[in-house]
Amino acid sequence: MRTIRRKSLPLNKGKQLKIIKIIEAYNKEKEIWIQFFINDTSSIKTHRKIRDKYVSQKYNSQYKLQARMWKLALIDASEMMDKYWMSLLPKINELINKNKNLTEVQKHYCFWILMNYERIEKLFKHKYPIPSHFDIDKKAVKKAGNYINRIIRNHKGKFPSIKKSRSFVLDADCYKIFENNGRQYISIMTLDKGKRLVIPLLGNTPIKGNIKVVLYKNYIEMHYTAILKPKKIKNEYIEAVDFGYTEVITDSKNRKYGIEFGKKMSSYSDKLNIKMKQRNKVHALQKKQSQVSKRKNIRKYNLGKIKLDNFSRKNKAGIEQEVNFGLNQFFSKQQPQVLITEDLRHLFSFGKIKSWNRKFSSWVKGFLQDRIGFKALARGSCHEQVNPAYGSQTCIKCGFVWKGNRVLDRFKCGFCGHEDYADRVAAMNYKSRYGDKEITRYTPFREVKTILDERFRRRLETSYEGTVPGRTSDTVSIALRTVIDTSVVQGGFLAVCT
């Protein structure tokens, strides 16, 4: 499954006002049902029965929502409460499991209670249901039940509520898709019976099932899900790529994709850095003001976030576009059965300059990681991640590891003299690490360095003529002593004897 976003053309004020009225009515109705499920936990999974009950009572929304829409608000509230409990229960289960004052039978009873909302509701009312297959006395049941009540009360926090109203849900009967003069339109249900609101859309793709309508400043987005149908790849081709800073990815043949990535990322990062420095100065000035009215005016007119948010959104959209373009380029030219990449969430960035880490932020890393995973899935490739430590500093010919091997985008081995592109070297090393039992994805980088150095020394000790380019069996012992004696590193290169 994938979530698709469809954007509308800019809306006039009249249509914006109608959308806002629908959103307000829908979310007020949803808030009522949230409170209903808070007061009656047992009904969370039985929203259909609740719906049928209120339909038989000829229920009408007090906010003038049509019948289908208040039913969707009911389902939406039920799902929200279910997600709330699903996020809370793992914490409760962990506390029960760690409690040494409970017997194994009592713990089993606690887990049995938490498997069903009706049992939880009975527990809140100090009723202790006992299943027939449990060999447990009432005193032990009461102790376990009171413990569950106590830890839920201590850890439940605030119940979910609607803090910002800007969306509503429609099912397939609440909207209709049609085309006119090559333009796709959607007509959606409004608060007025028999009157629908027609909105022009950008693009032209099929929209089916339930959709979420999200209002932004002067346009809306339709969010809906579609089933992924990945292609079947018959070849056994394995490819590795390296994420770059100037481009999105580089493959093992040094082909680069998404070459505008670095320019866009640098431009956004540098401009944002300047903006935030200026805002920090204004913020410091605000703190120095003694008058409350002046502080409020500075905060209102000089520290607002509307322009800043628009700036960030536009620049992030440009970066996202370049990432998607680069990945589409790659998959249109290559269809590997296995695609190997570095694990960006644990990116080895020790010793990087401050500006590099700022530009290649956690947001960029996370987005790159998520997009390549999705694109690989959609194209039928198996995405595998490997440990990135020293990927661009390890020679692919002799295995020598040294930070001086790489200078910017160029690679020159300080031991055997092999020259190459740093990104291609990294891609080749990631490819060789696929299936490596010693260097796993989560091996600490210091251990990786130890393993690589040991492999290099072992290779020198057992080498024969031709194994290492430029080396013979007569010079291996000299070279080995040189590598071990790190004091001979001078002027950016290893002073090795050849």
Image (cartoon, rainbow, N blue to C red):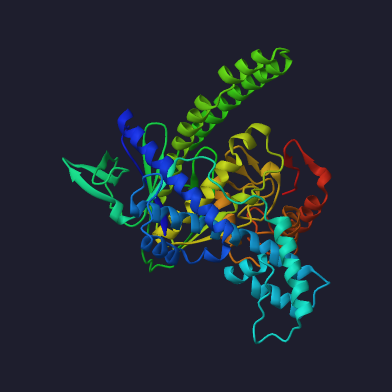
Left or right: where does residue 402 sit relative to residue 379? Answer: right
**Looking at the image, can residue 359 be seen?**
yes
- Residue plotted at (52% across, 37% down): 246
Q: Nearer the viewer, residue 218 or 462?
A: 218
Q: Nearer the viewer, residue 167 or 431?
A: 167
- The image quadrant that residue 304 belongs to is top right
Left or right: where does residue 480 sit relative to residue 184? Answer: right
Measured along the vertical axis of the image, is residue 173 above or below residue 313? below
- Residue plotted at (33% across, 57% down): 209
Q: Nearer the viewer, residue 86 or 409?
A: 86
Q: Position of residue 361 (x, y in %)?
A: 60, 39
- Residue plotted at (60% across, 49% down): 344
Q: Position of residue 46 (x, y in %)?
A: 48, 67
- Residue plotted at (74% across, 61% down): 151
Measured along the vertical axis of the image, is residue 97 above or below residue 475? below
Farthest residue to the left: give it.
Answer: 181
Measured along the vertical axis of the image, is residue 297 above or below residue 484? above
Give the number of marks.
Answer: 0
Measured along the vertical axis of the image, is residue 13 above or below residue 425? above
Q: Position of residue 312 (x, y in %)?
A: 51, 31
Q: Position of residue 35 (x, y in %)?
A: 55, 53
- The image quadrant that residue 198 belongs to is top left
- The image quadrant that residue 326 belongs to is top left
In the rendered image, which quarter contains the N terminus? bottom left
Left or right: where does residue 299 sit relative to residue 233? Answer: right
**Looking at the image, can residue 460 be seen?**
no
